[in-house]
Image (tube, rainbow, N blue to C red):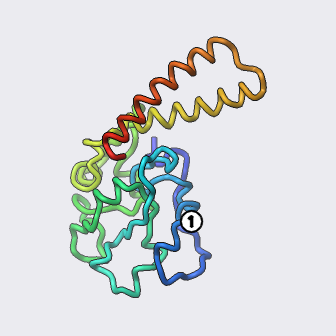
Amino acid sequence: MRVHGEIYVAHRHNYMQKSNYQDYLKELSEDFHHICAYCGKKDIISKNSFEIDHYIPKKLLKKSEYSLYSNLFYCCHTCNRKKSSKWPTGNRDIDNDGNIGLINPTSTDYDLAIEKNDNGEIVSLTPLGEYLIRNVFQFNLRPMQEIYKIEKIYEYRDIIHKKMTDGTINEDEKDSYIKLHEELLDLERLLRDNKE
């Protein structure tokens, strides 16, 4: 499955130019459907605030380009810190050489390089995908499967909540939800411990 699941992230074309890139946080959160551009984590799950990443790092930009909307990405704190100012090619016009570098997560190339498996682990499909996983975002060292489990529990919680509101919940569903809630607390504790 895609890292972003069913969601397709993309920048809006009509936006008001702003001088401070930080002022785009609301627009970016909407454009990216409240998920991290790089790992697909939902902002509601994160224990840290989501941030704005400069895809092409500021060190390669003119100060007047810091607020270029198409270069700004909504992402989780962890992905932003892992990516930091990495730009392996050194050339702002070339994001990768096919084996090392970055891929714009709004492009279809991102989906061709990495994906989530059925357990929520982010896996590589290409050598460049492997580079992204191990050298840029370190998905292989992060609790990606646990994040995926939390997302699934949240989805189930919403279904159960609707059934409770409608009065259509049965005892087995109540018992199942109680067990999942306990697992959710453990998983959330794990995310806090891992600063995700």
Residue 136 lies left or right of residue 145; in this view the side is left
Q: Residue furthest top?
A: 171
The residue located at (28%, 79%) in the rendering is 60
* Residue 189 position in % (x across, y down): 38, 35
* Residue 24 position in % (x across, y down): 52, 71
* Residue 90 position in % (x across, y down): 21, 74
Residue 158 lies left or right of residue 104; in this view the side is right
- SS for dot 1: helix
Quarter of the rendering occupied by the N terminus: top left
The residue located at (42%, 32%) in the rendering is 118
Which image quadrant is residue 101 in?
Answer: bottom left
Label 1: how many residues lie within 10 Å, few (<14), some (14-19) or many (20+)? few
Which image quadrant is residue 88 in?
Answer: bottom left
* Residue 134 position in % (x across, y down): 23, 49
| Relative depth, front residue between 190 and 118 | 190
Q: Amino acid at mark 1?
A: Lys
The residue located at (32%, 40%) in the rendering is 193
Q: Residue furthest right?
A: 166
| Relative depth, front residue between 15 and 48 | 48
Residue 175 lies left or right of residue 68; in this view the side is right
Q: From what the image shows, is residue 178 above or below residue 79?
A: above
Q: From what the image shows, is residue 115 above or below residue 75?
A: above
Residue of label 1: 26
The residue located at (28%, 64%) in the rendering is 84
Which image quadrant is residue 14 in?
Answer: bottom right
